[in-house]
Image (cartoon, rainbow, N blue to C red):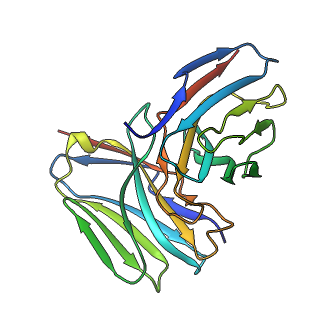
Protein backbone atom coordinates (compact mmCIF):
# COMPACT_ATOMS: atom_id res chain seq x y z
CA UNK A 1 0.00 0.00 0.00
CA UNK A 2 3.02 2.23 0.41
CA UNK A 3 4.11 1.77 -3.20
CA UNK A 4 3.99 4.27 -6.03
CA UNK A 5 3.92 2.58 -9.44
CA UNK A 6 5.50 4.55 -12.27
CA UNK A 7 5.34 3.97 -16.02
CA UNK A 8 6.85 3.77 -18.53
CA UNK A 9 10.32 2.71 -17.47
CA UNK A 10 11.79 4.50 -20.48
CA UNK A 11 10.46 6.96 -23.02
CA UNK A 12 11.74 8.35 -26.30
CA UNK A 13 10.13 11.54 -27.60
CA UNK A 14 10.83 13.70 -30.61
CA UNK A 15 11.93 17.27 -30.00
CA UNK A 16 8.85 19.45 -29.72
CA UNK A 17 6.61 16.57 -28.71
CA UNK A 18 4.77 15.90 -25.45
CA UNK A 19 6.31 13.59 -22.86
CA UNK A 20 3.87 11.88 -20.50
CA UNK A 21 4.85 9.90 -17.42
CA UNK A 22 2.25 8.23 -15.23
CA UNK A 23 2.12 7.22 -11.58
CA UNK A 24 -0.45 5.34 -9.53
CA UNK A 25 -0.82 4.82 -5.79
CA UNK A 26 -3.01 2.88 -3.39
CA UNK A 27 -2.63 4.71 -0.09
CA UNK A 28 -5.43 7.28 0.18
CA UNK A 29 -3.53 8.95 3.01
CA UNK A 30 -0.99 10.35 0.54
CA UNK A 31 -1.49 14.12 0.29
CA UNK A 32 1.62 15.48 -1.41
CA UNK A 33 2.89 14.39 -4.82
CA UNK A 34 6.24 15.76 -6.05
CA UNK A 35 8.18 15.02 -9.21
CA UNK A 36 11.97 14.94 -9.23
CA UNK A 37 14.33 15.32 -12.19
CA UNK A 38 17.75 13.69 -12.22
CA UNK A 39 20.52 14.21 -14.76
CA UNK A 40 23.20 11.51 -15.18
CA UNK A 41 25.72 11.50 -12.35
CA UNK A 42 23.79 14.10 -10.34
CA UNK A 43 21.38 14.05 -7.43
CA UNK A 44 17.63 14.44 -8.08
CA UNK A 45 16.08 17.88 -7.79
CA UNK A 46 12.47 18.84 -7.14
CA UNK A 47 10.75 19.80 -10.39
CA UNK A 48 7.11 20.38 -9.49
CA UNK A 49 4.65 19.19 -6.85
CA UNK A 50 0.90 19.04 -6.28
CA UNK A 51 -1.54 18.52 -3.43
CA UNK A 52 -4.88 16.72 -3.95
CA UNK A 53 -6.99 19.86 -3.54
CA UNK A 54 -6.26 20.79 -7.18
CA UNK A 55 -6.47 18.68 -10.34
CA UNK A 56 -3.69 20.38 -12.26
CA UNK A 57 -0.59 22.45 -11.66
CA UNK A 58 1.49 24.07 -14.37
CA UNK A 59 4.97 25.52 -14.22
CA UNK A 60 6.30 26.57 -17.58
CA UNK A 61 6.36 23.53 -19.87
CA UNK A 62 5.78 21.12 -16.99
CA UNK A 63 2.27 20.16 -15.85
CA UNK A 64 1.06 17.74 -13.21
CA UNK A 65 -2.41 16.27 -13.73
CA UNK A 66 -4.00 14.68 -10.68
CA UNK A 67 -6.98 12.31 -10.60
CA UNK A 68 -7.92 11.70 -6.99
CA UNK A 69 -10.70 9.18 -7.69
CA UNK A 70 -8.43 7.07 -9.88
CA UNK A 71 -5.47 7.54 -7.52
CA UNK A 72 -3.28 8.53 -10.42
CA UNK A 73 -1.11 11.50 -11.30
CA UNK A 74 0.99 12.28 -14.31
CA UNK A 75 3.71 14.60 -15.53
CA UNK A 76 3.34 16.24 -18.93
CA UNK A 77 6.31 17.96 -20.57
CA UNK A 78 5.16 20.17 -23.42
CA UNK A 79 7.46 21.08 -26.32
CA UNK A 80 10.03 18.55 -25.09
CA UNK A 81 13.66 19.56 -25.61
CA UNK A 82 16.90 17.54 -25.69
CA UNK A 83 17.85 19.29 -22.43
CA UNK A 84 14.86 17.58 -20.78
CA UNK A 85 16.55 14.21 -21.27
CA UNK A 86 16.86 12.90 -17.73
CA UNK A 87 15.36 10.39 -15.30
CA UNK A 88 12.09 11.48 -13.70
CA UNK A 89 10.79 10.17 -10.38
CA UNK A 90 7.32 10.60 -8.99
CA UNK A 91 6.85 10.41 -5.23
CA UNK A 92 4.20 10.61 -2.56
CA UNK A 93 4.01 11.64 1.08
CA UNK A 94 1.22 10.79 3.48
CA UNK A 95 -0.63 12.31 6.38
CA UNK A 96 1.45 10.12 8.69
CA UNK A 97 4.57 11.72 7.26
CA UNK A 98 5.98 12.02 10.73
CA UNK A 99 6.70 8.30 10.59
CA UNK A 100 6.97 7.48 6.89
CA UNK A 101 9.39 9.21 4.55
CA UNK A 102 8.71 10.14 0.93
CA UNK A 103 7.85 7.09 -1.23
CA UNK A 104 9.43 7.13 -4.71
CA UNK A 105 8.45 5.49 -7.98
CA UNK A 106 11.14 3.55 -9.82
CA UNK A 107 11.81 6.28 -12.34
CA UNK A 108 11.39 6.94 -16.05
CA UNK A 109 14.36 7.56 -18.30
CA UNK A 110 13.35 10.18 -20.86
CA UNK A 111 15.30 10.70 -24.06
CA UNK A 112 14.33 13.62 -26.29
CA UNK A 113 15.76 13.24 -29.78
CA UNK A 114 16.15 15.93 -32.42
CA UNK B 1 26.42 28.78 -0.36
CA UNK B 2 23.89 26.40 1.18
CA UNK B 3 23.45 22.82 0.22
CA UNK B 4 24.43 19.22 0.74
CA UNK B 5 27.91 17.94 0.13
CA UNK B 6 28.93 14.34 -0.34
CA UNK B 7 32.48 13.21 -0.55
CA UNK B 8 34.20 11.72 -2.32
CA UNK B 9 32.42 11.66 -5.69
CA UNK B 10 34.06 8.34 -6.61
CA UNK B 11 35.24 5.73 -4.14
CA UNK B 12 36.96 2.42 -4.75
CA UNK B 13 37.37 -0.32 -2.16
CA UNK B 14 38.42 -3.92 -1.98
CA UNK B 15 35.86 -6.51 -1.02
CA UNK B 16 35.78 -7.16 2.72
CA UNK B 17 36.63 -3.60 3.73
CA UNK B 18 34.25 -1.25 5.51
CA UNK B 19 33.90 2.19 3.93
CA UNK B 20 32.29 5.39 5.22
CA UNK B 21 30.54 7.87 2.95
CA UNK B 22 30.32 11.46 4.09
CA UNK B 23 27.22 13.66 3.99
CA UNK B 24 27.15 17.22 5.32
CA UNK B 25 24.40 19.84 5.07
CA UNK B 26 24.35 23.51 6.04
CA UNK B 27 20.64 24.00 5.45
CA UNK B 28 19.77 23.61 9.14
CA UNK B 29 17.48 20.71 8.22
CA UNK B 30 16.33 18.32 10.92
CA UNK B 31 15.80 15.25 8.73
CA UNK B 32 18.43 13.42 6.68
CA UNK B 33 18.26 10.37 4.44
CA UNK B 34 20.46 7.87 2.63
CA UNK B 35 19.38 6.24 -0.63
CA UNK B 36 20.96 3.66 -2.86
CA UNK B 37 20.42 3.88 -6.62
CA UNK B 38 20.96 0.98 -9.02
CA UNK B 39 19.98 0.96 -12.70
CA UNK B 40 16.24 0.33 -13.05
CA UNK B 41 15.74 0.15 -9.28
CA UNK B 42 14.91 3.76 -8.53
CA UNK B 43 15.77 5.23 -5.15
CA UNK B 44 15.83 2.75 -2.29
CA UNK B 45 15.88 4.10 1.25
CA UNK B 46 18.68 2.79 3.45
CA UNK B 47 18.40 4.82 6.66
CA UNK B 48 16.85 8.08 7.76
CA UNK B 49 17.12 10.36 10.75
CA UNK B 50 14.55 12.82 12.02
CA UNK B 51 16.69 14.30 14.76
CA UNK B 52 20.17 14.17 16.24
CA UNK B 53 21.06 10.88 17.95
CA UNK B 54 18.08 9.11 16.42
CA UNK B 55 17.70 7.16 13.17
CA UNK B 56 15.49 4.49 11.63
CA UNK B 57 16.06 1.67 9.17
CA UNK B 58 14.72 2.07 5.69
CA UNK B 59 13.84 -0.64 3.19
CA UNK B 60 17.37 -1.99 2.64
CA UNK B 61 19.32 -1.34 5.86
CA UNK B 62 21.09 -4.71 6.05
CA UNK B 63 24.85 -4.33 5.71
CA UNK B 64 24.80 -0.59 6.42
CA UNK B 65 25.17 1.54 9.53
CA UNK B 66 24.77 5.26 10.27
CA UNK B 67 25.29 7.80 13.01
CA UNK B 68 23.79 11.21 13.67
CA UNK B 69 25.95 12.89 16.29
CA UNK B 70 25.56 16.35 14.77
CA UNK B 71 22.61 17.98 13.03
CA UNK B 72 24.63 18.75 9.92
CA UNK B 73 26.30 15.36 9.47
CA UNK B 74 24.91 11.90 8.63
CA UNK B 75 27.71 9.51 7.59
CA UNK B 76 26.91 6.10 6.11
CA UNK B 77 29.16 3.07 6.63
CA UNK B 78 28.96 0.29 4.09
CA UNK B 79 30.10 -2.79 5.94
CA UNK B 80 31.64 -5.98 4.62
CA UNK B 81 28.28 -7.64 5.34
CA UNK B 82 26.67 -5.78 2.43
CA UNK B 83 26.63 -8.37 -0.35
CA UNK B 84 26.42 -6.02 -3.35
CA UNK B 85 27.85 -2.67 -2.24
CA UNK B 86 28.70 -1.29 -5.69
CA UNK B 87 26.12 1.44 -6.35
CA UNK B 88 25.42 5.16 -6.51
CA UNK B 89 24.68 6.51 -3.01
CA UNK B 90 22.61 9.64 -2.48
CA UNK B 91 22.20 11.66 0.67
CA UNK B 92 19.24 14.02 1.14
CA UNK B 93 17.81 16.33 3.76
CA UNK B 94 14.51 18.05 4.45
CA UNK B 95 13.44 20.72 6.95
CA UNK B 96 11.53 18.06 8.87
CA UNK B 97 10.35 14.49 8.37
CA UNK B 98 6.97 15.75 7.22
CA UNK B 99 8.34 18.23 4.69
CA UNK B 100 7.72 17.00 1.16
CA UNK B 101 10.72 18.55 -0.48
CA UNK B 102 13.98 16.70 -0.07
CA UNK B 103 17.24 18.28 -1.14
CA UNK B 104 19.73 15.84 -2.59
CA UNK B 105 23.50 15.86 -2.61
CA UNK B 106 25.54 15.11 -5.76
CA UNK B 107 26.04 11.46 -4.80
CA UNK B 108 28.98 9.11 -4.28
CA UNK B 109 29.65 6.29 -6.70
CA UNK B 110 31.11 3.36 -4.78
CA UNK B 111 32.85 0.55 -6.59
CA UNK B 112 33.90 -2.55 -4.66
CA UNK B 113 36.07 -5.15 -6.37
User: Is A32 or A85 nearer to us in this picture?
Assistant: A32
Q: Please say if B73 is above or below B100.
A: above
Q: Position of residue A43 (x, y in %)?
A: 45, 39
- Out of A56 and A13, give the one closest to the viewer: A56
- Whether residue A9 appears in this view of the structure is yes
Residue sitting at x 68%, y 54%: B51
Residue B66, percent from left and from top:
74, 39
A68 over A107 or under it: above or below: below
Q: Residue at x 62, y 65 (%)?
A: A3
Describe residue B24's horizontal placement relative to residue A13 as left or right. Answer: right
Q: Position of residue B85 (x, y in %)?
A: 71, 29
Q: Is residue B38 at least partly visible in the picture?
A: no
Note whether A14 is above or below B17 in the view shown.
below
The residue depicted at 64 percent of the width and 74 percent of the height is A96
The residue drawn where x is 50% and y is 61% is A91
Decide which of B68, B37 is in the foreground and name it. B68
Quarter of the image that includes the C terminus of chain A: top left
Q: Nearer the viewer, residue B22 or A92?
A: B22
Residue that protrudes farthest toward the bottom in the picture: A69
Q: Residue B38 vs residue A36: left or right?
A: right
| Quadrant in the picture for residue A64 | bottom left
Amino acid sequence: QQQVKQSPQSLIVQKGGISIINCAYENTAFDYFPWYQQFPGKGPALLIAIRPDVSEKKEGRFTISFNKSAKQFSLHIMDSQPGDSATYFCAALGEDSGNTPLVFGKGTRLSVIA
Amino acid sequence: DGGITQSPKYLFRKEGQNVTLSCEQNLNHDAMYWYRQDPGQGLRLIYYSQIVNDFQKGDIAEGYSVSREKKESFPLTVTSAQKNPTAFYLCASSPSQGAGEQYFGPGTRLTVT
